[in-house]
Image (tube, coloured by chain):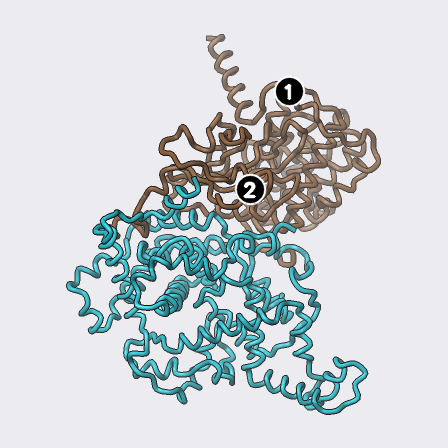
Chain colours: A cyan, B brown
Amino acid sequence: MATDFWSSSHNKRWIVDRATLKQARIDDLHYVENAEQLDFLNIYFANVISKLGKRLQVRQRVIATATVFFRRFYTKNSYCETDPFIVISACCYVAAKAEESPVHIKNVVSESRLLFSREILTTPAEHAADFDTEEEYGIKHFPSDNSKLAEMEFYLVHDLECDLIVFHPYRTLMALCGKEAILNVAEAGELGIGVDGGPRYWGTGEGKLELEEGPLQMAWFIINDTYRSELCLLYPPHMIAIAAIYLTLVLNVTTRAAIQTQAQAQNQPAPPPTRRSSRTSSSGTHKKAPQDIVGFMAGLNVSMSLVATIAQEIIALYTLWDRYKEDATPESSRSTFGRPPSSASAGTKRSAASRDTSVFMGSEELSTAGTPRLADDVVTPAFLTHLLFRMREARLADVSHPATGRPVAVNKMLERTQAAG
Amino acid sequence: MASDHPAVLDDNRREHSRPLSPQRGRDHDLEQISRPHTPTRGGRDELYSIVSQVGEGTFGKVYKARNAMNGLYVALKRIRMESERDGFPVTAMREIKLLQSLRHDNVVRLYEMMVSNGSVYMVFEYMDHDLTGILSQTGFSFTDAHLKSLCRQMLAGLAYLHHKGVIHRDIKGSNILVNNRGELKLGDFGLARFYQKRRRSDYTNRVITLWYRPPELLFGATVYGPEVDMWSAGCIMLELFTKKPVFQGTDEIHQLEFIFKILGTPSPERWPGVSDLPWYELVKPKEVIPNHFRDMFRKWLSPAGLDLAEQLLAFDPTKRVTAVQAMEASYFKDENPPAAMPVGLANLEGEWHELETKRERAKKRRRTDGGTQ
């Protein structure tokens, strides 16, 4: 089957290793204080894409695709040599078209203008002081001309090598939890949807995991959150989905209780004919026999060590995100992102939440117990916006007055072609 | 600087043609094509040199071009960008996505995408002829076995598309490509789209070139499926034998009248639900016409061929055969002669595309016009 994940460009060309990502950021690294700031930028950009996507009223899937496009673009370009804001707009614009729910270019331009001018205006005074005049902002104003965005779209599609088909973990999540009916509506126009059932493209698994609405939503939110990192470039989407399910099972109160019951049952000396049946039969506290969660995970037939690695990276992302605050003032932010996710184990209580929410947002009410943070430990969007300006300025200065006396090659595309030739 | 140039500091990347995926050959035979050439400015040393124009696609011209590295011919389809104020056309994006996910002997292969001089090109395998062109030439005559093979290959391509959940929505002579080895491939996916098998959804009914448009679309249906392609396939099947399009209407109403004249008027028994279609009251037949189909085509088609064509041209979309069913027809399975690929096309002089046929006709017309004056 030519349209499956394994033969797709996503799998063949766009799953990269850490070294490649490091290489892609090598220029940017000169203009930041530490590599961590680049990780914060990953969160920041994903948030901006998500905000723009919501303004454009596109589905979560379009936002996810736009984020993947953005990450792919920046495996070949540097933040300091480009204007990430117009790249973000172009990513949203292309993603909407690629996912069969196009938005008008004028709409993208006007919403981008509104959003980005606000992003810049939320600058707190201490950061604004770094900049000499108001005119500095003028440069960053988003072009009102449609053709600028259309031109950027051209470069974007070029660097994406016209590979517009992106796979996402949501599909695996829904397939594993037997919610394909919902999937069909949610992902109309996606490849292979018209194809009759067909086997899963990985693993053996016939097993289905029965998740209640709460845990299922939590897993969905965790997947949303993974786009704040570069995970979508590093691992296949179905592995990310399994890692999200794994985290949900451990962190969510009900599922964790089920696993604990199961583990206790296993430890009790019972005379089992087979292991599996003993597990399912020995704990009768629920109405029906609880499902064999551990057995389900084992039956997935994927590398559990890789799942654990991805889960670790997701937790690392949350630890970092904990220090990222949307609000400019540290006081108010504490109530928003005050807690590491491991303690957010009660999971989301919001039942009617929409699908674009993060786990963090979902656990807001739990965050009052969060430890207070020092202000200098915290990174704000305003700070990152200014960091981007400074990077860009410094890069421009370096290019026009190179310290080495030698002109710096700016066009990486040209560099690569020359190397190849 | 930033304000007059989005994102990139240097515009050099638009200057020279460069395959979009230089670092990896997708297939062994493509490694040559996919490898980047030495970058040089100016057009002469470009990877592909254009030989001639061979067609006009839904959103741009199609050229025959030669790969300078390996001498192989390709078809370059240029996506018009300058006329698109909204940037990359959504139809082009759809076609790229579709073709990247399709791989079948009877579907034209998209080798790669390429950017040159500010245009995006789709690089296809080169096909020597299209069906309209090849049926209009007189240098090679097709036997019944050849025509059976062409018909079967078309149905095999459609069966694959429909299995993949894709409706082509523009099956016609100039979109059916034939090469010198006698292979037939479906091309131009500019109007194609994915459809959902389980849930019927609303689409535009302004698709499919008029002569190949099924009656339900002419009656205004917006909820349809792959059956629309099967009607077009029926038209093509007849055209293989008659050498020219069968239902040549001038507008939607005339098109329906043309169809009725041959196939008769649809009765509620023949097509339950026809009267519920949106435009039925506007364009319904004024008088009852009997079906003349068999009388008219008996001299062209064999009995089993007539049966299949009739099933493809069923008025009621629910009764129309699917591509898979059509391939199982007695016409292919039992009736002699068995299908044979028209391999003799290799000896045919020239390349036959609709574009050339049209130009030839125009030239002739000019000549005769000049003669009468």
In the rendered image, residue A180, in percent from the top left (x then y), is placed at 62, 66
* Residue type for callout 2: Phe
Disc 2: which chain?
Answer: B
Residue B28 lies left or right of residue B343; in this view the side is left
Residue drawn at (32%, 43%) of the image = B11
**Label 1 sits on what residue type?**
Leu
Q: Which residue is mark 2?
A: B189
Whether residue B320 is visible, yes or no, is: no
Q: CA distance from mark 2 to mark 1?
A: 28 Å
Element carrying mark 1: loop
Mark 2 or mark 1: whose residue is earlier in sequence: 2
Residue A86 lies, with reference to residue B291, above or below; the image says: below
Crowd around label 1: few <14 · some 14–19 · many ≥20 (10 Å) = some
Viewer-nearest residue: A238 or A104: A238
Judging depth in this view, the residue of B62 and B250 nearest the camera is: B62
* Percent position of residue A222, x then y: 50, 73
Kindly identify which numbered label has been placed on residue B114. none
**Residue at x-position 17% and y-position 63%:** A134
Marks 2, 1 in one chain:
yes
Asked where in the image residue B345 lies, by quadrant, the reply is top right
Say if mark 2 contacts mark 1, CB within 8 Å.
Answer: no
Q: Give the chain of mark 1.
A: B
Q: From the viewer's perspective, is residue A295 above or below residue B172?
A: below
Residue found at x 61% / y 87%:
A257
Residue B46 is left or right of residue A326, and the answer is right
Residue B294, image quadrant:
top right
The label number, if any, that marks residue B348 in the structure image: 1
Element class at badge 2: loop
In this view, the residue farthest toward the front is: A404
Work out whether residue A284 or residue B352 is closer to the camera in this orientation and state it: A284
Q: Position of residue A70 (x, y in %)?
A: 42, 58
